[in-house]
């Protein structure tokens, strides 16, 4: 079930001693994650760059739809910008709920997918009634090929304070943020008269207010203050943690290989002396 809507992936309810799994982190893993899983090692079709990993993290080459872990092995599972890529979303969700007790899912929203679509994205996703509703992108009307990600992902988030405030005060406009416990409610390719029009028809005022309920002026001001506070917090954390260095996957695995070779040579030499 859904527990809350975090501001972003730096606002998660992860406890100090939680064991954290991150699936499909690509070039931008969360430092708090203990184990990193990725399906594609030598192919960047599904990400913006080569796999990166922090020195303290453990890497596992695996498919998110078939995870090589025990039931409830992890306290928290992070899936940031991954669900929209998968072949079988039901199986993927089933697996992360099997290996994890709690977690966080983030995906582009329908508007986000329109603004910065990726050819590798298979699903358009909306968060409706605490359910993640997925609709096959190839069935969507409209132009989902022009990609303005350079503006909305790589420029405005770093240059425009009003844009940052928009993302935090109306976060669901472009991103779905879903923190969960025990299970995740999803609907795939809905055909009913309630969910289907969100993907195939013009949005009327009732549909808009369903996704973005009206707020009192007090809640508007509070949302702005909370957003400014969060931006300041992230800037402080970035300055404190600027020495954290990411490694390529090859660099990350090299020390382990070197240590293994040294241990092997040491054992061989000891055997010769004996």
Image: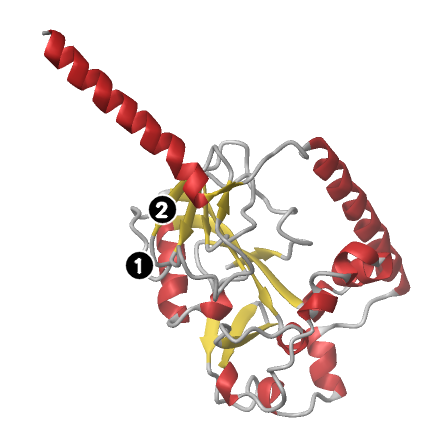
Give the quadrant of residue 262. Answer: top left
| Foreground: disc 2 or disc 1 | 2
- Identify residue for label 2: 60
What is the x, y in percent for residue 234?
A: 73, 43
Residue at 55% of width from left, 91% of height from top? 193
Looking at this rendering, what residue extends furthest in the top direction?
A: 274
- Of the numbered discs in the image, which one, if any, rests on residue 50? none
Task: Classify mark 2: residues with Cα within 10 Å, few (<14), some (14-19) or many (20+).
Answer: some
Q: Earlier in the sequence, mark 2 or mark 1?
A: 2
Q: Quadrant of the C terminus?
A: top left
Left or right: residue 132 compared with residue 71: right
SS class, disc 1:
loop
Residue at 82% of width from left, 57% of height from top? 159
What is the x, y in percent for residue 187?
A: 47, 75
Above or below for 15 versus 48:
above
Marks 2/1: CA distance? 12 Å
Left or right: residue 173 compared with residue 95: right
Q: Quick check: marks 2 and 1 in contact, CB under 8 Å?
A: no
What is the x, y in percent for residue 149?
A: 67, 69
Question: In the rendered view, how is the structure colored?
Answer: secondary structure
Q: Nearer the viewer, residue 236 or 200?
A: 236
Q: Nearer the viewer, residue 240 or 182?
A: 240
Above or below for 273 versus 40:
above
Above or below for 137 versus 54:
below
Residue at 11% of width from left, 12% of height from top? 272
- Identify residue for label 1: 66
Task: Classify mark 1: residues with Cα within 10 Å, few (<14), some (14-19) or many (20+).
Answer: few
What is the x, y in percent for residue 78?
A: 50, 51
């Amino acid at each position: 079930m859904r527990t809350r809507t975090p501001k972003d992936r730096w606002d998660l309810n992860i406890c100090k001693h939680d064991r954290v799994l991150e699936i499909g982190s690509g070039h931008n893993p969360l430092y708090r994650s203990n184990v990193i899983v990725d399906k594609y090692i030598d192919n960047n079709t599904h990400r913006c760059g080569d796999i990166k990993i922090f020195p303290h993290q453990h890497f596992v080459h695996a498919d998110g739809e078939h995870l090589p872990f025990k039931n409830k092995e992890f306290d928290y599972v992070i899936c940031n910008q991954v669900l929209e890529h998968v072949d079988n979303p039901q199986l993927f969700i089933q697996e992360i709920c099997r290996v994890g007790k709690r977690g966080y899912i983030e995906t582009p929203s329908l508007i986000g997918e329109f603004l910065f679509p990726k050819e590798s994205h298979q699903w358009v996703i909306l968060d409706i009634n605490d359910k993640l509703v997925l609709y096959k992108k190839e069935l969507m009307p409209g132009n989902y090929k022009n990609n303005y990600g350079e503006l909305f992902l790589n420029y405005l988030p770093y240059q425009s304070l009003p844009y940052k405030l928009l993302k935090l005060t109306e976060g669901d406009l472009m991103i779905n943020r879903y923190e969960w416990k025990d299970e995740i409610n999803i609907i795939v390719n809905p055909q009913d008269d309630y969910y289907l029009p969100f993907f195939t028809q013009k949005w009327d005022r009732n549909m808009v207010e369903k996704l973005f309920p009206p707020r009192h002026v007090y809640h508007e001001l509070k949302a702005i203050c909370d957003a400014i506070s969060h931006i300041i917090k992230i800037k402080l954390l970035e300055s404190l943690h600027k020495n954290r260095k990411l490694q390529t996957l090859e660099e990350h695995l090299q020390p382990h290989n070197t240590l293994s070779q040294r241990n092997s040579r040491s054992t061989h030499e000891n055997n010769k002396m004996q």
